Amino acid sequence: MTHHITLIQGDGIGPEVVGATKAIIDASGVKIDWEVCEAGKEVFKKGIASGVPQETIDSIKRTRLVLKGPLETPVGFGEKSANVTLRKLFETYANIRPIKEFPGVDGPYKGKGIDFVIIRENVEDLYAGIEYMSTPGVAKCLKLITRKGCEKIVRLAFEFVRAEGRKTLHCATKANIMKFSEGMLKKTFEEIAPEYPDIEAHHIIVDNCAHQLVRFPDKFEAIVTTNMNGDILSDLGSGLIGGLGLAPGANIGDGIAIFEAVHGSAPKYAGLNTINPTAVLFSGVMMLRHIKEFEAANIIEQAVLATLESGVMPQDIAAPGKGVSTTDFTQTIIKNFGKSSNAWKARDYKSLVIPKVDQRPDLVPCSSKKVVGVDIFLDSPLFGEALGSSLTHIAHASAFELKMISNRGVQIYPSAGTSPDVVDLWSCRFMARSGACDQAQVRALVALIEEQHRWVNIELLQTFDSKEAYSKAQGENQSAAPAPQAAAASR
Ligand code: NAP
């Protein structure tokens, strides 16, 4: 069978590492019709702001499979990177990064037998890039986490672990602090885990996970996590096994997969024939398994390992002066087809089952949604006590009462007697006096407030099936009645 695959060579060292990978895959006998397409630097320079021309998009729509080199966004061209364009266009929601110790390669953990994979959510979280400046001195970024996004990544993680014959999956979150957002991944993980009784499921706090990875990296088999946590943990992981030249990756979506190394275009090495193609080559090996070419994948993987074990290495991982060129390394791998490594036992790989994606936007059923109050964010030069008195007075004419004012997440009014540092963005929490309100009442309150204050944004306080769907400020519900002197001290 002939596979149709879009091939993007990429920028900088891209043509060398992708060229080496293509040569090795072709030599393995797998039949591939490569559709060679453009993206990245030169495309930006032609004035295409996304960095990805229509022909490339059309090719990917046809093939649904991509092997790509690294892409650059040249300074002064384009608003977003071509990588982000591809990720968003094709909703590749999972980023999979295997971290495995290579035989013969020196590193601080040599001999530990590190072999784990990070399965990182790839489109949500802080990296959705939804940012606002609320005042000239206050920036915020929306940490967007959805039940749908969590279900997709958690199910894919369990399926990936199963396909690779692994036994344990950790879910790393910061749910102890961000109970709704990071908590949603933890909750989803715990709800879905019983569907996979063959896999041991553990939750771990992400900072502890980083600590454990450095101390006992061999204890982990797979880690599923949110976007930013995953970004950091996977770079930590590539550091454990000898660097970026050895770190492959895959971006998986619903019926689409883009395979690429973790590293970038390393422009200073472009055209020098010195860099390490292993990261892209192993991304290609992941691709071969994805298209069920298990035998060719094993032959290539074992040939690379045998090559490294024999001491033939590219310059980034060889002893000083001992490294071979990219092309010599490539040719040696091809010559070593049929050899195998003693150190790296081939897994019993199975096809990855991509979980079905539920098309409903409202994935979580809820029988009652109630608005119980509103947080109104003010850009104000006033401080706690003065602002509190003014808003309390204004609220008398509305359906609400001022419950508290917080600044940077800490209650300022009524004061708890502490003196937190403050900025010019105040979150003013109004609760409906009757326990519930409608949106017209919220608008009426906002109209009253804007006569005297500058509001920046509002956030409804809701309950879903009687459960509060908003967090409390630090100190909220702990302080006594307003104490003018204490409030003054908070300035
Ligand atoms: P980089 O290209 O990953 O290079 C950083 C360093 O990592 C290199 O200087 C080199 O280290 C080492 N390295 C990377 N790949 C290697 C390889 N195959 N063999 C041997 N050593 C390798 O990171 P960067 O310099 O920050 O980024 C350069 C450009 O790539 C930027 O425009 C960035 O936006 C882009 N980028 C693209 C992607 C992508 O397309 N997915 C990802 C990341 C970055 P030494 O200097 O120590 O030898």
Image (cartoon, rainbow, N blue to C red):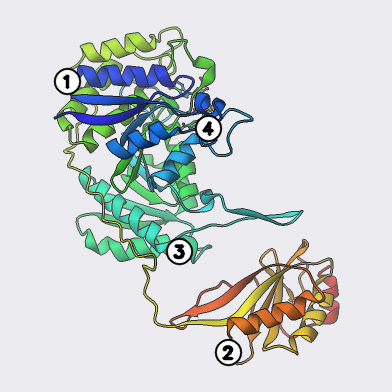
Tell which circle, 1 or 2, labels the residue nearer the N-terminal end. 1
How dense is the environment of label 4, judged by Cα within 10 Å: few (below 14), some, or many (20 and up)?
Answer: some
Q: Is mark 3 in CB contact (under 8 Å) with mark 4?
A: no
Instruction: Determine which residue is flagged by label 4.
Output: 48
Apparent side of residue 369 relative to residue 313 in the rendered image (left or right): right
**Residue type pointed to by label 3:** Gly
Q: Residue 318: x and y, percent?
A: 40, 14
Left or right of 380, for residue 295: left
Determine which of the numbered discs, if any, sits on residue 104 in the image. Answer: none
Element at label 1:
loop
Residue drawn at x 68%, y 68% is 410
Amino acid type, mark 2: Gly
How many residues crowd around disc 3 within 10 Å: few (fewer than 14), some, or many (20 or more)?
A: some
Residue that carries the numbered disc 3 in the rendered image? 183
Residue 326: image x %, image y %? 38, 12
Pointer 1: what residue?
29
Q: Nearer the viewer, residue 282 or 18?
A: 18
**Relative to the observer, which residue lies in front, 424 or 97?**
424
Image coordinates for residue 249, horizontal then vertical, percent: 36, 35
Q: Which amino acid type corresponds to the residue marked 1 in the rendered image?
A: Gly
- Disc 3 and disc 1 in contact, CB within 8 angstroms: no
Q: Residue furthest bottom?
A: 434
**Quarter-wise, where is residue 137 in the image?**
bottom right
Disc 3/disc 4 C-alpha distance (Å)? 39 Å
Q: Nearer the viewer, mark 4 or mark 2?
A: 4
For the residues labelled 3 and 1, the Cα–Cα distance comes to 47 Å
Image marks 2 and 3: residues in contact by CB distance under 8 Å: no
Dot placed on the residue nearer the N-terminal end, 1 or 4: 1
Amino acid type at image mark 4: Ile
Residue holding disc 2: 435
Residue 334 location, quadrant: top left
Name the N-terminal-most of marks 3 and 4. Answer: 4
